[in-house]
Image (spheres, helix red, strand yellow):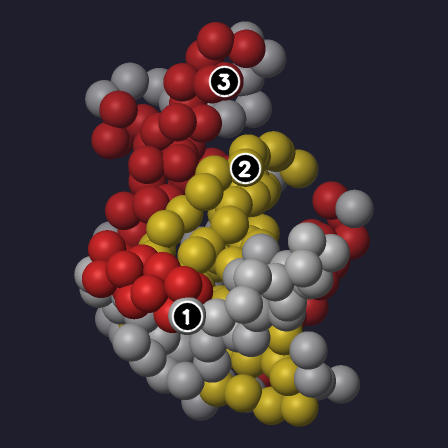
Amino acid sequence: MIRRRLFIAASALLFLLADHPCSAEFAHPFHATSLELEWNPETGCFEAALRLPGPPLDEELARIAERPVSLDTTDPVKRRQNEKILEDWVRNRLKLTAKDLPNCEIRWVGAETELRSVWAYFEIRLQPKKPEQQQSKAQANKSDSPAPKKDDKKKISCPVDDLQVQCRFFEHLRGQVNATTIRIPGRRGSVILTEVHQSGLIEWAPAQ
């Protein structure tokens, strides 16, 4: 599974860069990141797999922690401590928004190392600006409608309108590229971001 994800991510990055007008100017192989998003209609959130270059990531986290950091350590205590630094780093540098959903919540799943890369796994749930008002409205609507059957499973549609990604990974490195691909039923989206252009709208195409 890990090697399959690595192959998919590398292939997606090369495919996106091939069509990018400025691809010859950047895409340093050790500075590129790849974010794969897949919509889960059962949970109403995106399942994310983020591939990061190992050596630059260790240097970046060490700079933040002001001590040596390695996610490839075999010490379980240091591993948990270092992964928490990575989790906070991702939360502070990645944001996904859509129309009427300007906030996002990241639920961390875990991380693992593969060759010279680090894979981070998490879920992203988009949220409105004032979730308490949204919740009150939903409860009011719920009280006026018949209770659903316990075995009913409603599919939640992906919010595709104005879906935007903001990445600030390794923003201090010249030539940094952040490639995002997203899969939903029947459609495939993508966007290329750099240290200069750190946010952009997802461009959609029919799924192949």
Q: Can you tell which mark lies on residue 102?
A: none
Q: Can you tell which mark lies on residue 144?
A: 1
- Dot 3: what SS? helix
Residue in the image at 31% along x and 58% along y: 135
Residue in the image at 41% along x and 85% along y: 161
Residue at which label 2 appears: 109
Count all numbered tags in the image, as a single digit. Answer: 3
Determine the CA span between mark 1 and mark 2.
Answer: 37 Å
- Judge from the rendering whether residue 189 lies leftward or rightward of residue 27; answer left or right: right
Q: Is residue 63 visible?
A: yes
Q: Residues within 10 Å of mark 1 (few under 14, many from 20)?
A: few
Determine the CA span between mark 1 and mark 3.
Answer: 50 Å
- Judge from the rendering whether residue 168 lies leftward or rightward of residue 156; answer left or right: left
Residue 117 at x, y percent in the picture? 58, 42
Res. 64 image quadrant: top left
Amino acid at dot 3: Arg
Q: Residues within 10 Å of mark 3 (few under 14, many from 20)?
A: some
Looking at the picture, tell me which residue is in the foreground, 172 or 154.
154
Residue in the image at 45% along x and 27% along y: 83
Whether residues under marks 2 and 3 lie with C-beta atoms below 8 angstroms apart, the answer is no
The label nearer to you, 2 versus 3, is 2
Residue 127 at x, y percent in the picture? 34, 61
Nearer-N-terminus badge (1/3): 3
Amino acid at dot 1: Asp
- Dot 2: what SS? strand
Q: Residues within 10 Å of mark 2 (few under 14, many from 20)?
A: few
Q: Is residue 169 visible?
A: no
Determine the CA span between mark 2 and mark 3.
Answer: 14 Å
Whether residues under marks 1 and 2 lie with C-beta atoms below 8 angstroms apart, the answer is no
